[in-house]
Image (cartoon, rainbow, N blue to C red):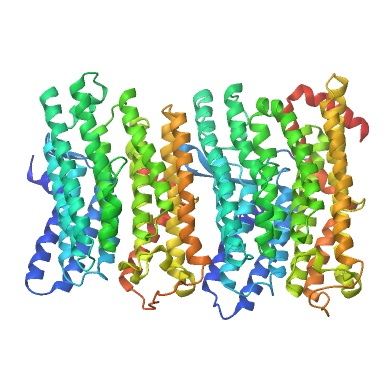
Amino acid sequence: MADALILNVVLFLPVAGMAFTALAHERQPNLVRAGTFAAMLVQFALTAWLYLRFDATAPGLQFATHLPWIPEWGVAYLIGLDGYNVLLVLLTAFLGPIVVAGAWTAITKDVRLFHAMVFLIQFAMIGTFLAQDLFLFYLFWELMLVPMFLMIGIWGGERRIYATVKFVLYTAFGSILMLAALIYLVWQLKTTTGVTSFAFADLYGAGLAPQAQAWLFAAFALSFAIKVPIVPLHTWLPDAHVEAPTAGSVILAGVLLKMGTYGFMKLGFPLFPDAARDAVPIVMTLGVISIVYGACLALVQDDIKKVIAYSSISHLGYVMLGLASLDLIGIQGAVMQMVSHGLTAAGLFLMVGMIYERCHSRDLADYGGLAKLLPVYSMFFMVLTLAAVGLPTTSGFTGEFLALLGTFRAAWSAHAAGDSTLLWLAGIAVSGVVLGALYMLRLALRLLFGASRAPHAPLADLSAREVGLLTAVVAAVFWLGLFPDEPMRKTELAARQYQQLVAGPQAVAGTAAIAGGTR
Amino acid sequence: MNVQTLFVSMLPEHLLLGGLCVALVVDMLGRARAVLAIAIVSVAAAALAAVLLALGGYAAATFPGQLSVGPATSAGKAIVLLLAVPVLMLSRDEFRDARFALLALASLYGGCLVVSADSFLTLLLGLEILSLPVYVLVLLAMQRPDSAEAALKYLVLGGAATGMLLMGASLLFGWSGTLAIDAFGRALGAPEAMPRAAVGLVVSAFFLKAAVFPFHAWAPDAYEGGSVPATAYMATIVKATVLLAVVRLFGSEGLAPATAMLVAVPPLVSIVWGNVAAMRQASFRRMIAYSSIAHAGFLFFALLGAAGGRFQAVAFYLAAYGLASVLAFAALPREADDVAGDRLEALKGLFQRRPFAAVVLGLAMLSLAGIPPLPGFVAKFLVFRNVMAAGHELLAVAGLVGSYLGLYFYLRVIQYMFMSPRADGVEATATLRRYAFAASLACLVPVALLTVFPGWVLGMLR
């Protein structure tokens, strides 16, 4: 009971924070920053406490709150932690203080509004993950647009208006189709079973006709695919990333993109299992295209932020691959990859922000040999680069390797059954690992090594604040790389449930035996 | 009919009439500034009376066959009157004399009659009492050269609407031999030519009054020509009353396919055209006019739903839409009332100058755009849920995609206020307008209520 209360505090603390920013005075920016940072720390501490208390062996929701909200429509305020969202909520809460600390010196205009928006984003993101009711989920999902729109549009770079409008129009188009689909879905649930409910648990058993499933899946999938983003719906992402302030990029790469993959895992696939199984080859193909295409584009960018933006598209391709493999290991890998990418991309964007604050340039051609100029900076950059590449002992390895392993296992059994398309796809996906090493190392090489060059030398190396927040990110990266067992146990039951919902019980029985053998 | 029924069932009307009489006398005594206070108090009292009648479930046939009151009627009146309170407050900055308040009181009386009309006679009477003062309201802003043109346009087209309504009512009378509005309900399902023509004429008249495509062209001019409070009055009160009358007309009848198309296609075009045209406007009030054309489309869409949920959907939508519109007008900077200040560009950098106004106006835009968790979203959801449940899936999807088109121009307002530096030639006035501030608070409180407890409000509108 007390834990359920804590979960509500975690969710609504940002709302109180917004009130705080409204009451504070614009002439005391440091008070606003410190207050926000403290609130975010508290939020993270509470989330970490709940994470530790989270019981890996208990199926279903934990620390749940269930209150009727719009009884007439069957809408409830239903939130709780489960294996699907526990790591993502932890990640979101973890990045909260880091975002605030990272923006400490970078944001000097409209400080109160900025922190209010950070609070609002945090509220919307955590709400989206915690919601177990489709109406509530959609509410938070859409709410996210507003602070992000303002964040890119007010504190962004030169073409910020174009970028932010594009971002909103892309994502809102997906949302509106999802809205139509969810209204239809709930109405169908009522006509077939007589239950008026938006709860995920009720909707999983809606038992829709295949035709309806295909349409609804298409609408949900389009909405999530724009958010991930999956090629060819990705064009908003580089613009948004490049123009966003560092804090915006960190939030975007760290958490927002995971909304799409989380949506696929929690809703898109399990709500419409028949349609989803039919769509597996398409999703896998698009995932592989995202991996390779994103990597190829990252390889030729001269803007540092664009390299990382395109690398995000590539990395999230693995997540899609792992989810679509419907293999337990692949699913677990996808979850790990989500968290890992959240950490490494957030860290890298932070570091780009730090160098931009010093030199006001993101052009790779302006830089070189930072290893000599900024040794501490360079060390952190190298560690995060290697984590993004997926070097063993870092979180990137755990995620990518497991996702690919799962894909290969699924592809192999399909191959044994006479269909080797998946095997080909999996083979191409592996090339993404090589490409990933290429573009990340090219970035590190051009930035850190060679003749020492920077637009504003001499440069000050990292401050204690910057070292502190990067240390936290790197520590998390190694935690997931060295001890993936503990977090993976907390997500395992959810992965199994997902597999069972999508693949059906018979298919799962087969793979469970294999999984038992290898473990 | 006994005296007690007459007194209780029409209590909101009596309060309005009483307020009007007192205000007239006070005005004649030369205390023009007290008139507004009297008007606000009497409208608020009338609203309270309507709320109490609705909560108490009071139902009576005051004038059998002509006028009756039920919980839904009272709830409708309550919404209209509650919206009128902040609109009256807004008028304080514009009109120092008593004219606006007096005209608005008279018009509201007509609005209440419309909402509880049982026959076409009462309906027409109410509509005329509602509309005539509004023609004058538009004309009141005589400092603007185009006010006269706007008022004339509005008057001529309003007259055309009355004509169509009369023609439709006559045809209905010829077909059914009665002037009761139930005849309209029966005509909805009738296959003969005469009732169908009657339905077409009556619906067209209401399309015109509510500014639905293809009868929408007067709205941008009238909205632009009028003063801010007059525009707010037209956009919220008049629209709300007309829509509540339409819901009453349609009653509990299902729609024949042909009728369904009649109330689906023009509103759908309205949604799309209103939103597309709004993108190109440079004047704030023209933009709001096109936005209101689109919203009128959504409101008529609600009629496609099953009969039981129509009133709830329309009433909730009207409350959400009306509150957001009034909020937007209340937050507008004072300088917005001349031609230069009405430019959207004048809003540039508003957040730097007046943060509270910018945030409030931003909230209003987001609610109009239907972004959750604001009431506009729940309202939109409710309408499309009903349309979908009535089996019009494709129409619902088309309407939703149409609503997506609106997002761009609502966000552009926010973009101007928060992301752009101030435009040249716009004078910043730093004075706090106390009445506009009070008006925005009078809207923000119910907006918060609708946001946090939509289920409770929906239950009351059942």
* Residue A518 in the image: above or below residue A460: above
Decide if residue A215 is on the left or right side of residue B13. right
* Residue B307 in the image: above or below residue B80: above
The percent coordinates of residue A368 (x first, y second) are 87, 68
Residue B167 found in image quarter: top left
The percent coordinates of residue B337 (x first, y second) are 30, 67
Residue B346 visible in rendering: yes
* Residue occupying image coordinates x 38% and y 38%: B269
Residue A64 visible in rendering: no
The percent coordinates of residue A88 (x first, y second) are 72, 50
* Residue occupying image coordinates x 74% and y 27%: A503
* Residue occupying image coordinates x 45% and y 55%: B410
Please name whichever residue, A457 or A223, is drawn nearer the observer in this view of the structure.
A457
Decide if residue B114 is on the left or right side of residue B223. left
Give the quadrant of the N terminus of chain B.
top left
Please name whichever residue, B68 or B161, is drawn nearer the observer in this view of the structure.
B161
Residue B41 found in image quarter: bottom left
The percent coordinates of residue B110 (x first, y second) are 16, 49
Please name whichever residue, B151 or A202, is drawn nearer the observer in this view of the structure.
B151
* Residue A166 in the image: above or below residue B114: below
* Residue B250 in the image: above or below residue A66: above
* Residue occupying image coordinates x 23% and y 28%: B185
The total number of labels drawn is 0
Residue A445 found in image quarter: bottom right
Give the quadrant of the C terminus of chain B.
top left
